[in-house]
Image (spheres, grey):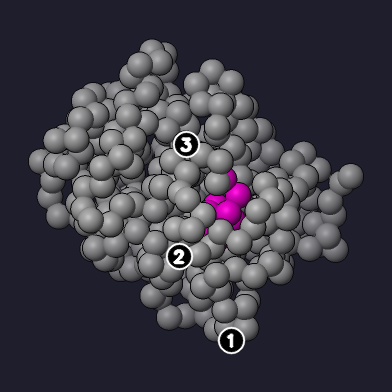
Amino acid sequence: MHTVAVLSLKGGVGKTTVALGIASAALRRGTRTLVVDLDPQGNATSSLDPPYTDATLVHVLEDPRRSVLERAIAPSIWSDNVDVLVGSEDLEQLNEPGADARRLENLSRALDELHQKPLRDTPYELVILDCPPSLGRLTKSALVAADSALIVTEPTMYAVAGAQRALEAIEKIREDNNPGLRAIGVLVNKLRVRSYEHQFRIAELRDSFGSLVMPTAITDRLAVQQAQGACSPIHEWHSPGAQEIALTFNMVLAKILRSSRAGRHRIKSDEDPLDTDNSDNTEDTANPEAPVNGVDREDPAGEVYELRPTNAPQSG
Ligand SMILES: Nc1ncnc2c1ncn2[C@@H]1O[C@H](COP(=O)(O)OP(=O)(O)O)[C@@H](O)[C@H]1O
Ligand SMILES: [Mg+2]
């Protein structure tokens, strides 16, 4: 079981979109997945539209026992292979900035419980934590529970500052609570390929974060909003724009599954068909030309947008 936190300390940049895009790639790959909705706005829960549960993440964060978890997890409308640990607007009340370490560990305890004894016959291979935009107890709990963290940003002014703050939060939690936590990358979302401003901001991000900026970006596409509005996984939305973005999410998923194998909830290599990479070099695994399971690189439906040095000069 691998747990990835999707974060940015800014609202509206696409955390939920990215969390759902990764879940959609996992669904396509047949990877059993749990999406945990930590945002009091509950957008991930709305999009995944599970049946009513009489408990939510609020209860799990207060009391991470199995009996509570069972009541707070439900299958998504997408598939029985993608479950939701249901969010609630009451989460806001738990989002105090100075929660003690014990309380911060409750989500981690709950996920350990799922890891040790799966709710159903097939255990979760992937847990995606959709974070709120603030650095309170909710995002910290996610970082304490995660094996890896993916930073989402828009290519706009303040993107560098926002990503820097997110990276600092990851580093602080790694030092204080979770030594196994890794930053897997900075994923640029809502890119307008022809925008000079966006290319300039990407160059800035690369100056600051180098190879941590992921080599493919998610473009700004109406299809994203259309698929979300229809509660559909992006992989099942049949427009060229959606297909292009779906391919990018396949690559992001492959990188997540490959780059953070050292996590606490490590799965044995013989269990995972993607485990062909023995190196821990995340730059290597970021190579968009690397063979990626489940990705048809010749897919005629669309092409992923790769950030190239010509349009986004990389420093050093
Ligand atoms: N790549 C994209 N193309 C078009 N619209 C997008 C894209 N990513 C996100 N959006 C839209 O932007 C809004 C905010 O995205 P969301 O994922 O909810 O952000 P966050 O979770 O960071 O607050 C939503 O309406 C979403 O549909
Ligand atoms: Mg969100």
Which quadrant of the figure has residue 57?
Answer: top left
Q: Is residue 218 visible?
A: no
- CA–CA distance in space, label 2 to label 3: 23 Å
Q: Is mark 1 within 8 Å of ligand 1?
A: no
- Indicate which disc, 1 or 3, sits on the residue closer to the N terminus: 3
Magenta residues span 253-260
Q: Which mark is residue 25?
A: 2
Horizontal and vertical percent position of residue 310: 85, 63
In the rendered image, which residue does mark 1 sit on?
300
Give the SS element for disc 1. Answer: loop
Q: Of circles 2 and 3, which is in front?
A: 3
Question: Which one is nearer the viewer's eye here, 195 or 116?
Answer: 116
**Is residue 296 depicted above or below 70 in this figure?**
below
- Residue 97 in the magenta stretch? The answer is no
For residue 290, say whether it is visible.
Answer: yes
Is the CB of mark 3 within 8 Å of ligand 2? no
Residue at (13, 46) in percent of width and height: 53
| Left or right for 243, reference 64 | right
User: Label 2 is placed on what type of residue?
Assistant: Ala
